[in-house]
Amino acid sequence: MIKPSIPKGTRDFGPAVVRKRNYIFQTIRETFELFGFQPLETPAMENLNTLTGKYGEEGDKLIFKILNNGEILGQAQLAKDSKELATLLCEKALRYDLTIPFARYVVMKQHELALPFKRYQMQPVWRADNPQRGRYREFYQCDADVVGSNSLLNEVELLMIYDRVFSKLGLQGYEVRVNNRKILSGLAELIGKPEMLTDITISIDKLDKIGIEGVQQELLHRGLSHQDVEIVNNFLRIDGSNDEKLQQLQVLLQASATAQKGIEELAFVLNSGMATFNAAPIVDVTLARGLNYYTGMIVEAKAPPAVKMGSIGGGGRYDDLTGLFGLPGLSGVGISFGVDRIYDVLEELQLFPAAAQQSTRVLFLHMGAESLPVAFNYMMQLREKGIAAEVFHEAAKMDKQFKYADKRGIPYVVILGESELQENSLSIKHLQTGQQQKISAGELLNFQFV
RNA sequence: GUGGCCAUAGCUCAGUUGGUUAGAGCAUCAGAUUGUGGUUCUGAGGGUCGUGGGUUCGAGCCCCAUUGGCCACCCCA
Protein backbone atom coordinates (compact mmCIF):
# COMPACT_ATOMS: atom_id res chain seq x y z
CA MET A 1 0.00 0.00 0.00
CA ILE A 2 1.24 3.48 -0.84
CA LYS A 3 0.93 6.08 1.85
CA PRO A 4 -1.20 8.85 0.37
CA SER A 5 0.63 12.15 0.00
CA ILE A 6 0.99 15.18 -2.24
CA PRO A 7 4.15 16.84 -3.54
CA LYS A 8 6.04 19.26 -1.38
CA GLY A 9 4.73 22.78 -1.44
CA THR A 10 1.30 21.83 -2.80
CA ARG A 11 -1.98 21.77 -0.91
CA ASP A 12 -5.47 20.34 -0.98
CA PHE A 13 -8.21 22.87 -0.36
CA GLY A 14 -11.19 21.56 1.60
CA PRO A 15 -14.73 22.89 1.14
CA ALA A 16 -14.44 25.63 3.74
CA VAL A 17 -11.11 26.82 2.34
CA VAL A 18 -12.33 26.83 -1.25
CA ARG A 19 -15.30 28.96 -0.23
CA LYS A 20 -13.07 31.52 1.42
CA ARG A 21 -10.66 31.49 -1.50
CA ASN A 22 -13.55 32.01 -3.88
CA TYR A 23 -14.61 35.02 -1.86
CA ILE A 24 -11.19 36.55 -2.56
CA PHE A 25 -11.29 35.57 -6.23
CA GLN A 26 -14.77 37.05 -6.61
CA THR A 27 -13.75 40.32 -5.01
CA ILE A 28 -10.77 40.64 -7.33
CA ARG A 29 -12.61 39.49 -10.46
CA GLU A 30 -15.51 41.82 -9.85
CA THR A 31 -13.10 44.74 -9.51
CA PHE A 32 -11.14 43.80 -12.65
CA GLU A 33 -14.40 43.60 -14.61
CA LEU A 34 -15.60 46.87 -13.14
CA PHE A 35 -12.47 48.56 -14.45
CA GLY A 36 -12.96 47.13 -17.94
CA PHE A 37 -10.47 44.28 -17.97
CA GLN A 38 -11.24 41.15 -19.97
CA PRO A 39 -10.61 37.56 -18.91
CA LEU A 40 -7.87 35.42 -20.41
CA GLU A 41 -6.70 31.89 -19.69
CA THR A 42 -3.55 30.25 -21.01
CA PRO A 43 -2.31 26.66 -20.72
CA ALA A 44 -0.65 25.35 -17.57
CA MET A 45 2.37 24.41 -19.68
CA GLU A 46 4.35 26.53 -22.09
CA ASN A 47 7.18 25.67 -24.40
CA LEU A 48 10.31 25.75 -22.32
CA ASN A 49 12.02 28.26 -24.59
CA THR A 50 9.11 30.66 -24.09
CA LEU A 51 10.00 30.84 -20.41
CA THR A 52 13.77 30.49 -20.12
CA GLY A 53 15.78 33.66 -19.91
CA LYS A 54 12.81 35.80 -18.92
CA TYR A 55 13.16 35.66 -15.15
CA GLY A 56 16.87 36.02 -14.67
CA GLU A 57 19.35 33.37 -13.69
CA GLU A 58 17.65 32.60 -10.37
CA GLY A 59 14.26 32.43 -12.01
CA ASP A 60 15.37 29.93 -14.61
CA LYS A 61 16.39 27.53 -11.86
CA LEU A 62 12.91 27.69 -10.36
CA ILE A 63 11.04 26.74 -13.53
CA PHE A 64 9.31 23.37 -13.25
CA LYS A 65 10.28 21.34 -16.27
CA ILE A 66 8.26 18.55 -17.86
CA LEU A 67 10.01 15.42 -19.01
CA ASN A 68 9.25 14.45 -22.61
CA ASN A 69 7.23 11.32 -23.18
CA GLY A 70 8.60 8.31 -24.99
CA GLU A 71 11.88 6.50 -25.02
CA ILE A 72 14.01 8.96 -23.09
CA LEU A 73 17.11 6.82 -22.99
CA GLY A 74 17.13 6.03 -26.70
CA GLN A 75 16.54 9.69 -27.52
CA ALA A 76 19.29 10.83 -25.21
CA GLN A 77 21.85 8.79 -27.08
CA LEU A 78 21.11 10.69 -30.29
CA ALA A 79 22.21 13.97 -28.77
CA LYS A 80 25.33 15.58 -30.19
CA ASP A 81 25.88 17.99 -27.31
CA SER A 82 24.39 18.85 -23.94
CA LYS A 83 22.18 21.56 -25.41
CA GLU A 84 20.63 19.12 -27.82
CA LEU A 85 20.31 16.59 -25.04
CA ALA A 86 18.34 19.09 -22.97
CA THR A 87 15.77 19.64 -25.71
CA LEU A 88 15.50 15.92 -26.35
CA LEU A 89 14.67 15.40 -22.69
CA CYS A 90 12.49 18.41 -22.05
CA GLU A 91 10.73 20.95 -24.19
CA LYS A 92 7.79 21.95 -22.00
CA ALA A 93 7.55 23.63 -18.62
CA LEU A 94 4.89 24.73 -16.17
CA ARG A 95 4.07 28.40 -16.29
CA TYR A 96 6.11 30.47 -13.84
CA ASP A 97 3.97 33.59 -13.91
CA LEU A 98 1.12 35.02 -15.96
CA THR A 99 2.89 37.95 -17.55
CA ILE A 100 5.18 36.12 -19.97
CA PRO A 101 2.37 33.85 -21.25
CA PHE A 102 0.31 37.00 -21.71
CA ALA A 103 3.08 38.63 -23.73
CA ARG A 104 3.34 35.48 -25.83
CA TYR A 105 -0.42 35.54 -26.39
CA VAL A 106 -0.41 39.19 -27.42
CA VAL A 107 2.28 38.58 -30.02
CA MET A 108 0.48 35.53 -31.41
CA LYS A 109 -2.83 37.39 -31.65
CA GLN A 110 -1.49 40.85 -32.48
CA HIS A 111 -3.64 41.22 -35.58
CA GLU A 112 -6.89 40.34 -33.81
CA LEU A 113 -6.50 42.39 -30.66
CA ALA A 114 -7.96 45.83 -30.21
CA LEU A 115 -5.23 47.91 -28.60
CA PRO A 116 -4.91 48.92 -25.88
CA PHE A 117 -5.73 45.43 -24.66
CA LYS A 118 -6.75 45.16 -21.03
CA ARG A 119 -6.78 41.62 -19.74
CA TYR A 120 -7.03 39.91 -16.39
CA GLN A 121 -5.98 36.37 -15.62
CA MET A 122 -6.41 34.28 -12.46
CA GLN A 123 -4.61 30.96 -12.67
CA PRO A 124 -2.10 28.86 -10.76
CA VAL A 125 1.62 29.17 -11.39
CA TRP A 126 4.41 26.84 -10.32
CA ARG A 127 7.86 27.48 -8.93
CA ALA A 128 10.42 24.94 -7.73
CA ASP A 129 11.13 27.11 -4.71
CA ASN A 130 11.78 25.94 -1.17
CA PRO A 131 8.41 26.21 0.62
CA GLN A 132 7.91 28.15 3.84
CA ARG A 133 5.34 30.53 5.30
CA GLY A 134 3.59 32.35 2.47
CA ARG A 135 5.63 30.49 -0.11
CA TYR A 136 4.29 27.54 -2.04
CA ARG A 137 5.28 25.60 -5.12
CA GLU A 138 1.81 25.90 -6.60
CA PHE A 139 0.00 29.15 -6.03
CA TYR A 140 -2.44 31.46 -7.75
CA GLN A 141 -1.77 34.82 -9.25
CA CYS A 142 -4.41 37.31 -10.27
CA ASP A 143 -3.01 39.68 -12.84
CA ALA A 144 -4.41 42.71 -14.59
CA ASP A 145 -2.31 44.16 -17.40
CA VAL A 146 -2.72 46.77 -20.09
CA VAL A 147 -0.67 46.41 -23.22
CA GLY A 148 -0.33 48.97 -26.00
CA SER A 149 -0.90 52.15 -24.02
CA ASN A 150 1.65 54.64 -22.76
CA SER A 151 -0.87 56.63 -20.76
CA LEU A 152 0.01 57.04 -17.12
CA LEU A 153 -3.69 56.88 -16.36
CA ASN A 154 -3.26 53.11 -16.56
CA GLU A 155 -0.93 53.30 -13.60
CA VAL A 156 -3.45 55.46 -11.76
CA GLU A 157 -6.29 53.03 -12.38
CA LEU A 158 -4.23 50.00 -11.41
CA LEU A 159 -3.41 51.65 -8.10
CA MET A 160 -7.12 52.28 -7.68
CA ILE A 161 -7.75 48.56 -8.21
CA TYR A 162 -5.39 47.68 -5.38
CA ASP A 163 -7.11 50.22 -3.20
CA ARG A 164 -10.60 48.96 -4.01
CA VAL A 165 -9.85 45.26 -3.60
CA PHE A 166 -8.04 45.58 -0.28
CA SER A 167 -10.72 47.93 1.01
CA LYS A 168 -13.47 45.52 -0.05
CA LEU A 169 -11.68 42.71 1.73
CA GLY A 170 -11.60 44.80 4.91
CA LEU A 171 -7.83 44.61 5.06
CA GLN A 172 -7.03 47.62 7.20
CA GLY A 173 -3.47 48.82 7.36
CA TYR A 174 -2.38 47.55 3.95
CA GLU A 175 0.23 49.61 2.17
CA VAL A 176 0.74 50.25 -1.51
CA ARG A 177 4.28 51.41 -2.17
CA VAL A 178 5.41 52.91 -5.45
CA ASN A 179 8.67 53.82 -7.07
CA ASN A 180 9.91 54.32 -10.61
CA ARG A 181 12.60 52.25 -12.22
CA LYS A 182 13.90 55.34 -14.02
CA ILE A 183 14.75 56.89 -10.67
CA LEU A 184 16.88 53.86 -9.82
CA SER A 185 18.46 53.96 -13.27
CA GLY A 186 19.20 57.65 -12.70
CA LEU A 187 20.94 56.78 -9.47
CA ALA A 188 23.14 54.26 -11.26
CA GLU A 189 23.86 56.87 -13.95
CA LEU A 190 24.81 59.43 -11.36
CA ILE A 191 27.26 57.00 -9.85
CA GLY A 192 28.58 56.46 -13.34
CA LYS A 193 27.92 52.73 -13.33
CA PRO A 194 24.65 52.11 -15.17
CA GLU A 195 25.63 48.48 -15.65
CA MET A 196 25.50 48.09 -11.87
CA LEU A 197 21.78 48.95 -11.75
CA THR A 198 20.71 45.45 -10.75
CA ASP A 199 23.38 45.11 -8.06
CA ILE A 200 22.47 48.48 -6.62
CA THR A 201 18.73 47.87 -6.58
CA ILE A 202 19.06 44.41 -5.07
CA SER A 203 21.16 45.86 -2.28
CA ILE A 204 19.01 48.86 -1.44
CA ASP A 205 15.90 46.70 -1.54
CA LYS A 206 17.25 45.04 1.59
CA LEU A 207 17.31 48.25 3.60
CA ASP A 208 14.43 47.06 5.79
CA LYS A 209 16.20 43.87 6.67
CA ILE A 210 19.89 44.69 7.00
CA GLY A 211 19.84 48.42 7.75
CA ILE A 212 21.76 51.22 6.12
CA GLU A 213 25.15 49.89 7.20
CA GLY A 214 24.36 46.46 5.82
CA VAL A 215 23.48 48.03 2.49
CA GLN A 216 26.73 49.99 2.49
CA GLN A 217 28.79 46.90 3.12
CA GLU A 218 27.00 44.95 0.45
CA LEU A 219 27.50 47.74 -2.09
CA LEU A 220 31.21 47.93 -1.32
CA HIS A 221 31.35 44.18 -1.64
CA ARG A 222 29.67 44.40 -5.02
CA GLY A 223 32.35 46.77 -6.25
CA LEU A 224 31.19 50.32 -5.54
CA SER A 225 33.64 52.90 -4.26
CA HIS A 226 33.20 54.74 -0.95
CA GLN A 227 32.30 57.81 -2.92
CA ASP A 228 29.58 55.89 -4.79
CA VAL A 229 28.22 54.54 -1.54
CA GLU A 230 27.95 58.06 -0.18
CA ILE A 231 25.68 58.98 -3.09
CA VAL A 232 23.51 55.96 -2.36
CA ASN A 233 23.43 56.99 1.29
CA ASN A 234 22.03 60.39 0.42
CA PHE A 235 19.48 58.65 -1.75
CA LEU A 236 18.39 56.34 1.07
CA ARG A 237 18.05 59.22 3.51
CA ILE A 238 15.28 60.72 1.46
CA ASP A 239 12.27 61.03 3.73
CA GLY A 240 9.04 62.88 4.43
CA SER A 241 5.72 63.12 2.64
CA ASN A 242 5.40 61.95 -0.96
CA ASP A 243 5.85 65.50 -2.26
CA GLU A 244 8.83 66.11 -0.02
CA LYS A 245 10.46 62.91 -1.19
CA LEU A 246 9.90 63.84 -4.81
CA GLN A 247 11.44 67.27 -4.24
CA GLN A 248 14.51 65.79 -2.59
CA LEU A 249 14.86 63.34 -5.44
CA GLN A 250 14.68 66.16 -7.95
CA VAL A 251 17.59 67.93 -6.29
CA LEU A 252 19.71 64.87 -5.68
CA LEU A 253 19.25 63.41 -9.16
CA GLN A 254 19.11 66.62 -11.17
CA ALA A 255 22.07 65.55 -13.29
CA SER A 256 20.12 62.60 -14.69
CA ALA A 257 17.49 63.23 -17.34
CA THR A 258 16.27 59.68 -16.91
CA ALA A 259 15.66 60.18 -13.22
CA GLN A 260 13.84 63.46 -13.82
CA LYS A 261 11.52 61.65 -16.21
CA GLY A 262 10.85 59.02 -13.56
CA ILE A 263 10.15 61.62 -10.90
CA GLU A 264 7.79 63.39 -13.27
CA GLU A 265 5.93 60.17 -13.99
CA LEU A 266 5.64 59.32 -10.32
CA ALA A 267 4.38 62.82 -9.56
CA PHE A 268 1.68 62.51 -12.19
CA VAL A 269 0.54 59.11 -10.99
CA LEU A 270 0.25 60.33 -7.41
CA ASN A 271 -1.12 63.80 -8.08
CA SER A 272 -3.25 63.37 -11.16
CA GLY A 273 -6.12 64.81 -9.17
CA MET A 274 -8.50 62.36 -10.80
CA ALA A 275 -8.27 59.44 -8.42
CA THR A 276 -9.31 58.98 -4.82
CA PHE A 277 -7.83 56.41 -2.46
CA ASN A 278 -8.79 55.00 0.91
CA ALA A 279 -5.08 54.48 1.57
CA ALA A 280 -2.90 56.69 -0.60
CA PRO A 281 0.12 55.03 -2.25
CA ILE A 282 3.43 55.76 -0.53
CA VAL A 283 6.64 56.69 -2.34
CA ASP A 284 9.39 54.24 -1.38
CA VAL A 285 12.72 54.91 -3.10
CA THR A 286 14.12 51.60 -1.84
CA LEU A 287 11.46 49.57 -3.61
CA ALA A 288 13.27 47.64 -6.33
CA ARG A 289 11.37 44.48 -7.35
CA GLY A 290 13.31 41.66 -8.85
CA LEU A 291 12.00 41.17 -12.33
CA ASN A 292 14.38 42.97 -14.59
CA TYR A 293 11.88 43.87 -17.27
CA TYR A 294 10.30 46.76 -15.38
CA THR A 295 11.15 50.16 -16.84
CA GLY A 296 8.67 52.64 -15.36
CA MET A 297 6.50 52.66 -12.26
CA ILE A 298 7.00 49.77 -9.88
CA VAL A 299 4.48 48.97 -7.18
CA GLU A 300 4.25 46.59 -4.31
CA ALA A 301 1.30 45.85 -2.03
CA LYS A 302 2.17 44.94 1.52
CA ALA A 303 0.11 43.26 4.20
CA PRO A 304 -0.52 45.21 7.40
CA PRO A 305 2.76 45.20 9.37
CA ALA A 306 1.16 43.23 12.23
CA VAL A 307 1.14 40.10 10.08
CA LYS A 308 4.61 39.21 8.96
CA MET A 309 3.78 38.37 5.40
CA GLY A 310 5.42 41.04 3.31
CA SER A 311 4.40 41.36 -0.28
CA ILE A 312 0.84 40.37 -1.22
CA GLY A 313 0.99 41.86 -4.68
CA GLY A 314 3.23 43.66 -7.07
CA GLY A 315 3.60 45.04 -10.54
CA GLY A 316 4.87 47.79 -12.73
CA ARG A 317 5.42 49.09 -16.24
CA TYR A 318 7.58 47.26 -18.70
CA ASP A 319 8.34 48.90 -22.03
CA ASP A 320 8.78 46.50 -24.86
CA LEU A 321 7.83 43.28 -23.09
CA THR A 322 6.62 41.72 -26.32
CA GLY A 323 9.90 42.61 -28.01
CA LEU A 324 11.26 39.34 -26.64
CA PHE A 325 8.82 37.58 -28.95
CA GLY A 326 9.45 39.74 -31.99
CA LEU A 327 6.93 42.52 -31.53
CA PRO A 328 8.87 45.61 -30.41
CA GLY A 329 7.47 48.91 -29.25
CA LEU A 330 4.49 47.73 -27.24
CA SER A 331 4.42 49.02 -23.69
CA GLY A 332 2.68 47.19 -20.89
CA VAL A 333 1.76 47.89 -17.31
CA GLY A 334 0.20 45.55 -14.83
CA ILE A 335 -0.35 44.41 -11.28
CA SER A 336 -0.69 41.07 -9.57
CA PHE A 337 -2.49 39.82 -6.47
CA GLY A 338 -1.03 36.93 -4.46
CA VAL A 339 -4.23 35.17 -3.46
CA ASP A 340 -2.57 32.54 -1.30
CA ARG A 341 -0.86 35.13 0.84
CA ILE A 342 -3.96 37.30 0.98
CA TYR A 343 -5.81 34.22 2.23
CA ASP A 344 -3.27 33.64 4.98
CA VAL A 345 -3.48 37.28 6.01
CA LEU A 346 -7.29 37.38 6.07
CA GLU A 347 -7.34 34.13 8.00
CA GLU A 348 -4.87 35.41 10.57
CA LEU A 349 -6.82 38.64 11.04
CA GLN A 350 -10.15 36.76 10.95
CA LEU A 351 -11.54 38.98 8.24
CA PHE A 352 -13.59 36.43 6.32
CA PRO A 353 -17.27 37.36 6.52
CA ALA A 354 -19.73 34.69 7.63
CA ALA A 355 -21.43 34.94 4.25
CA ALA A 356 -18.25 33.61 2.62
CA GLN A 357 -18.42 30.47 4.70
CA GLN A 358 -21.86 28.94 4.49
CA SER A 359 -23.35 26.62 1.95
CA THR A 360 -26.63 24.77 2.52
CA ARG A 361 -29.11 26.89 4.48
CA VAL A 362 -31.73 24.31 5.32
CA LEU A 363 -31.66 20.59 6.11
CA PHE A 364 -34.95 18.68 6.26
CA LEU A 365 -35.14 16.07 8.99
CA HIS A 366 -37.69 13.32 8.79
CA MET A 367 -38.85 10.13 10.46
CA GLY A 368 -38.61 7.73 7.57
CA ALA A 369 -40.53 6.34 4.63
CA GLU A 370 -43.75 8.22 5.29
CA SER A 371 -42.37 11.71 5.78
CA LEU A 372 -39.43 11.55 3.38
CA PRO A 373 -41.40 12.19 0.16
CA VAL A 374 -43.20 15.10 1.79
CA ALA A 375 -39.92 16.57 3.01
CA PHE A 376 -38.42 16.07 -0.43
CA ASN A 377 -41.24 18.05 -1.97
CA TYR A 378 -40.77 20.96 0.45
CA MET A 379 -37.08 20.89 -0.23
CA MET A 380 -37.65 21.28 -3.96
CA GLN A 381 -39.89 24.27 -3.33
CA LEU A 382 -37.12 25.99 -1.37
CA ARG A 383 -34.61 25.26 -4.09
CA GLU A 384 -37.03 26.80 -6.59
CA LYS A 385 -36.74 29.97 -4.54
CA GLY A 386 -32.99 29.81 -4.73
CA ILE A 387 -32.46 28.63 -1.16
CA ALA A 388 -29.84 25.89 -0.90
CA ALA A 389 -31.64 22.99 0.76
CA GLU A 390 -31.06 19.31 1.38
CA VAL A 391 -33.01 16.44 2.82
CA PHE A 392 -31.36 13.72 4.89
CA HIS A 393 -31.49 10.70 2.61
CA GLU A 394 -31.14 7.87 5.11
CA ALA A 395 -33.73 6.78 7.61
CA ALA A 396 -31.83 7.70 10.72
CA LYS A 397 -32.44 8.78 14.26
CA MET A 398 -33.16 12.44 14.82
CA ASP A 399 -30.07 12.57 16.92
CA LYS A 400 -27.89 11.58 14.00
CA GLN A 401 -29.57 13.96 11.58
CA PHE A 402 -29.07 16.84 13.98
CA LYS A 403 -25.43 16.03 14.40
CA TYR A 404 -24.99 16.01 10.65
CA ALA A 405 -26.57 19.46 10.30
CA ASP A 406 -24.43 20.77 13.11
CA LYS A 407 -21.24 19.41 11.69
CA ARG A 408 -21.95 20.75 8.24
CA GLY A 409 -22.65 24.17 9.69
CA ILE A 410 -26.15 24.25 8.22
CA PRO A 411 -27.98 27.05 10.04
CA TYR A 412 -31.60 25.78 9.84
CA VAL A 413 -33.27 22.42 10.16
CA VAL A 414 -36.88 21.79 9.24
CA ILE A 415 -38.35 18.87 11.16
CA LEU A 416 -41.03 16.75 9.61
CA GLY A 417 -42.11 14.18 12.14
CA GLU A 418 -45.35 12.34 12.85
CA SER A 419 -47.13 15.20 14.53
CA GLU A 420 -46.15 17.68 11.80
CA LEU A 421 -47.25 15.21 9.18
CA GLN A 422 -50.67 14.89 10.81
CA GLU A 423 -51.13 18.61 11.37
CA ASN A 424 -49.70 19.54 7.97
CA SER A 425 -47.17 21.73 9.74
CA LEU A 426 -43.38 22.13 10.00
CA SER A 427 -41.01 22.80 12.86
CA ILE A 428 -38.14 25.11 12.00
CA LYS A 429 -35.15 25.26 14.30
CA HIS A 430 -32.24 27.67 14.13
CA LEU A 431 -29.32 25.68 15.41
CA GLN A 432 -27.13 28.48 16.67
CA THR A 433 -29.82 30.12 18.83
CA GLY A 434 -31.75 26.95 19.56
CA GLN A 435 -34.98 28.76 18.74
CA GLN A 436 -37.69 26.54 17.36
CA GLN A 437 -41.08 27.40 15.98
CA LYS A 438 -43.93 25.53 14.38
CA ILE A 439 -45.47 26.93 11.21
CA SER A 440 -48.18 25.72 8.90
CA ALA A 441 -46.98 24.12 5.68
CA GLY A 442 -48.22 27.03 3.61
CA GLU A 443 -45.97 29.48 5.43
CA LEU A 444 -42.73 27.73 4.49
CA LEU A 445 -42.08 29.71 1.34
CA ASN A 446 -42.50 33.00 3.18
CA PHE A 447 -40.17 32.07 6.01
CA GLN A 448 -36.99 34.14 6.13
CA PHE A 449 -34.00 31.84 6.30
CA VAL A 450 -31.65 34.69 7.12
C1' G B 1 20.64 25.80 -4.14
C1' U B 2 22.83 26.55 1.39
C1' G B 3 22.11 26.10 6.73
C1' G B 4 19.15 25.26 11.60
C1' C B 5 14.99 22.85 14.22
C1' C B 6 11.32 19.02 13.94
C1' A B 7 8.53 14.09 12.58
C1' U B 8 4.80 9.20 18.14
C1' A B 9 -3.35 7.46 17.06
C1' G B 10 -7.57 11.23 12.31
C1' C B 11 -5.77 16.17 15.22
C1' U B 12 -2.69 18.45 19.38
C1' C B 13 1.00 16.43 22.11
C1' A B 14 3.35 13.21 26.71
C1' G B 15 6.89 9.21 26.74
C1' U B 16 12.50 8.99 32.63
C1' U B 17 20.24 7.95 31.88
C1' G B 18 18.10 3.00 25.91
C1' G B 19 14.55 -1.83 29.49
C1' U B 20 8.68 -5.87 29.63
C1' U B 21 2.18 -4.97 26.79
C1' A B 22 3.81 3.06 23.89
C1' G B 23 -0.08 6.92 26.91
C1' A B 24 -3.51 11.47 27.45
C1' G B 25 -6.98 15.15 25.60
C1' C B 26 -9.92 16.15 21.45
C1' A B 27 -12.18 13.62 17.28
C1' U B 28 -14.73 8.89 15.54
C1' C B 29 -18.22 4.77 16.50
C1' A B 30 -21.79 2.27 19.89
C1' G B 31 -24.94 2.72 24.09
C1' A B 32 -27.26 5.53 28.47
C1' U B 33 -32.20 8.83 26.79
C1' U B 34 -39.31 6.77 23.13
C1' G B 35 -38.94 12.61 17.21
C1' U B 36 -34.02 17.57 19.27
C1' G B 37 -27.59 18.56 17.85
C1' G B 38 -23.61 21.66 19.99
C1' U B 39 -23.51 19.96 27.56
C1' U B 40 -22.99 15.08 30.64
C1' C B 41 -21.97 9.63 31.68
C1' U B 42 -20.28 4.51 30.07
C1' G B 43 -17.74 1.59 26.65
C1' A B 44 -15.12 0.42 22.02
C1' G B 45 -12.06 0.79 17.77
C1' G B 46 -7.64 3.00 16.10
C1' G B 47 -0.14 3.20 16.29
C1' U B 48 5.39 -1.96 11.99
C1' C B 49 6.71 5.63 16.79
C1' G B 50 7.81 9.36 8.65
C1' U B 51 10.87 5.68 5.58
C1' G B 52 15.48 2.60 4.99
C1' G B 53 19.87 0.99 7.17
C1' G B 54 23.24 0.63 11.55
C1' U B 55 24.98 0.29 16.99
C1' U B 56 23.09 -2.85 21.16
C1' C B 57 21.27 -8.67 24.80
C1' G B 58 17.44 -4.84 23.98
C1' A B 59 15.91 1.37 20.15
C1' G B 60 10.12 5.76 20.09
C1' C B 61 14.92 7.41 22.52
C1' C B 62 21.78 6.76 20.06
C1' C B 63 24.34 7.00 14.78
C1' C B 64 23.96 7.42 9.23
C1' A B 65 20.99 8.11 4.96
C1' U B 66 16.36 9.55 2.87
C1' U B 67 11.49 11.95 2.51
C1' G B 68 8.31 15.63 4.35
C1' G B 69 7.14 20.05 7.56
C1' C B 70 8.62 24.69 9.91
C1' C B 71 12.37 28.65 10.01
C1' A B 72 16.61 31.62 8.16
C1' C B 73 19.51 32.82 3.68
C1' C B 74 18.68 33.36 -1.63
C1' C B 75 14.66 34.97 -4.14
C1' C B 76 9.75 36.12 -4.32
C1' A B 77 3.34 36.19 -4.47
Image: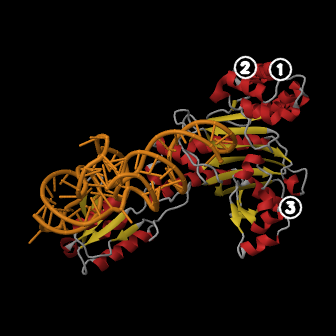
Q: Is residue A49 visible?
A: yes
How many numbered marks does the figure carry?
3
A353 to A43, vertically: above or below: above
Q: Nearer the viewer, mark 3 or mark 1?
A: 1
Residue A298 drawn at (x, y percent): 75, 38
| Front one among A291 and A268 | A291
Q: Which residue is mark 1?
A: A252
**Residue A224 x %, y %:** 82, 25
**In the rendered structure, which amino acid carries the disc numbered 1?**
Leu
Q: Amino acid at mark 2?
A: Arg
Q: Quadrant of residue A220?
A: top right
Residue at the image position 91 percent from the left and 29 percent from the top? A257
Residue indicated by mark 3: A110
Q: Are marks 3 and 1 in contact (CB under 8 Å)?
A: no
Q: Earlier in the sequence, mark 3 or mark 1?
A: 3
Most foreground residue, A1 or A286: A1
Alpha carbon distance from label 2 to label 1: 11 Å
Q: What distance separates the C-alpha of mark 3 from that of mark 1? A: 42 Å
User: Going from the N terminus, do you reach mark 2 or mark 3 first?
Assistant: 3
Quadrant the N terminus of chain A occupies: bottom left
Q: Are marks 2 and 3 on the same chain?
A: yes
Q: Secondary structure at mark 2?
A: loop
The secondary structure type at the circle numbered 1 is: helix
Q: In x, y percent, where is residue A20?
A: 50, 53
Q: Which mark is residue A237?
A: 2
For the residues beneath circles 3 and 1, the answer to whether they share a chain is yes
* In the foreground, A333 or A436: A333
Instruction: Choose mark 2 or mark 3, whichever is in front.
Output: 2
User: Could you tell me which quadrant the C terminus of chain A lies in?
Assistant: bottom left
Pointers 2 and 1 in contact (C-beta within 8 Å): no
Kind of residue sitting beneath label 3: Gln
